[in-house]
Image: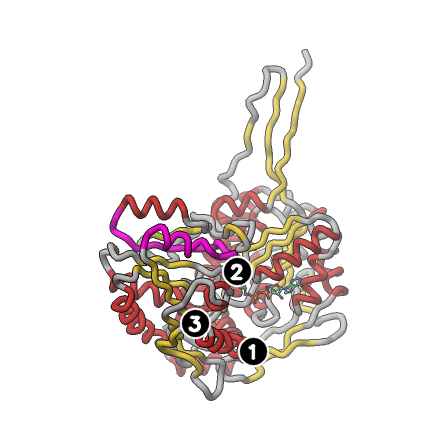
Amino acid sequence: MKTQQQWNELKQRCAIESRAFINGEYASAATGQTIAVVNPASDETIAHIARCDQQDVNAAVQFAREAFQRGEWSQSAPSVRKAVLNKFADLIDANNDQLALLETLDTGKPIAHSASTDIPGAANALRWYAEAVDKVYGEVAPTEQDVHAFITHQPIGVVAAVVPWNFPLWIACWKLGPALAAGNSVILKPSEKSSLSAIFLGQLAIQAGLPNGVFQVITGYGHEAGDALARHMDVDCIAFTGSTRIAGQLMVSAGETNLKRVFAEAGGKNANIVFADCGDLDRAAAETAAGCFYNQGEVCVAATRLLVDNQIKDAFVEKVIAAAKRFTPKDPLDPSSAMGALIDQDHKAKVLNYVKQGVAEGARLRCGGDVGGQGAFVEPVILDNVDNRMTVAQEEIFGPVLCVIGFDSEQQAIEIANDSKYGLGAALWSDNINRVHRVAKQLQAGSVWVNNYNEGDMTVPFGGFKMSGNGRDKSLHALEKFTETKTTWIRLHR
Ligand code: NAD
């Protein structure tokens, strides 16, 4: 890992591409308008990205459709797509420093995380689907003797991947991997707050050999470029990660236009339940802090609701407060930083407002809050004596705020955990195997972790119940959603 000084030197030398990537070329928005990109750790403006709108979206969709019809990607052998996507992944790895730096300058996240987790994770997501695509088979149906019926999967067509700012490249590649591997043309719409790494992918796509129009990047605001994609009659699928509110809007847009498929990965308010029979409370406390404060708490599956048995609550909260010290914010370009800046000053103000509201509703502030000075830095906040009906326990804050809620019985813990409109992740800590299975079965969440928080890899699906969404990223489950399922029914005449 480079030193802080080396990262700063690289920052001085770094030329930032900020245009959209359309039909194999970088291009400004048709209107010439731009959006300023601010580094949230220093409040400096570092670039101006293209502010694309309907005109640019129309052009990109047309190029995407033409590429799909030409078939050089959509009808290529899986082994061909595998080779190109593996090269794409290798190029991401080869450009790790540059991509990690862009990610950190754009979002404020620690460079150690960008360089060792986000960017390798993005490459790995592409590689996993590259390796999978020539190993999945169709099916033959068990029909009567004189019929041969088989079930195959075809690419859908034009897919728009609309993604958030918290893990910009990584989440983008959770969509790009399966959508491209399946043979679709993909238009990536990164968040207006974090577009630089997505833009950089354009040049890597050319080097990897993706045909023009198969992979494009449209930058701009959600209500302009994003909405134009969501309402476009020739976009066949929206693969979305972001807030529950926008997920709902996309479904309305699809319903009012061409019924495009909308797969949404949305918000969370995740319960992390610590029972008194947990055998390793030190480990549970360390993972509780990391589960809530990693990536500045800007994580959909952040462990934001700590449900802890009242018998051990006070002692356990002390351990979590100690463990949270590791996440004292520092310059994100310092490789020892475990917590950087929040995405922007507006978001910081929103997070701090929630803390104020929690205290006003009766929570006890145990530590953390505004750091002050330059940059959008917030110290990890722990609110004790929270009631699950309080605003801070019901709404997604998407910042470093942990709500501690006591319980007296297993049944009460399950009820509190499930008393949420969200259902993304949940965890429980216990050494009692019967309790583990009993509770895990009843938790309403797409991922349940036992005696760990937020482990996983590309082999397992990721997504939510209830208002946390309707799709699944990662694993073969995600590959299928980027395909149409076709039945071919052949009557064999004698
Ligand atoms: P957001 O919903 O504001 O934006 C997400 C994307 O949608 C951005 O690219 C944005 O430009 C675009 N968008 C906004 N309005 C749009 C519109 N009207 N039409 C089309 N596109 C539009 O979310 P955010 O603030 O970028 O990200 C934070 C949210 O993402 C949190 O709620 C978090 O929980 C969620 N998230 C979920 C997961 C998951 O896997 N479930 C993962 C990461 C983040």
Judged from the image, the secondary structure of the residue bearing numbered disc 1 is: helix
Q: In this view, does 239 lie to the left or right of 100?
A: right
Looking at the rendered image, the quarter that the N terminus falls into is bottom left
Q: In this view, does 161 lie to the left or right of 370?
A: right
Can residue 371 be seen?
Answer: yes
Whether disc 3's CB lies below 8 Å from ligand 1 is answered no
* Range drawn in magenta: 409-432
Q: Depth check: give the residue in front, 346 or 21.
A: 346
Q: Depth check: give the residue in front, 63 or 164.
A: 164
Q: Which amino acid does the dot numbered 2 rest on?
A: Gly
**Figure coloring:** secondary structure
Count neighbours of disc 2 (C-alpha within 10 A) and say few if under 14, some if 14 to 19, many if 20 or more.
Answer: many
Judged from the image, the secondary structure of the residue bearing numbered disc 2 is: loop
Residue, x 41% and y 46% (percent of image)? 442
Q: Which amino acid does the dot numbered 1 rest on?
A: Asp
Q: Name the residue under label 2.
A: 267
* Residue 449, horizontal then vertical, whole percent: 37, 53
Q: Which amino acid does the dot numbered 3 rest on?
A: Pro
Q: Depth check: give the residue in front, 416 or 161.
A: 416
The reply to whether dot 2 and dot 3 touch (C-beta < 8 Å) is no
Judged from the image, the secondary structure of the residue bearing numbered disc 3 is: loop
Q: Earlier in the sequence, mark 2 or mark 3?
A: 2
Q: Mark 1 points at which residue?
A: 346
On whether residue 52 falls in the magenta region, the answer is no
On whether residue 415 falls in the magenta region, the answer is yes
Count neighbours of disc 3 (C-alpha within 10 A) and say few if under 14, some if 14 to 19, many if 20 or more.
Answer: many
Residue, x 56% and y 59% (percent of image)? 241
Residue, x 71% and y 50% (percent of image)? 255
Q: Mark 3 points at which residue?
A: 400
Cα–Cα span, label 1 and label 2: 19 Å
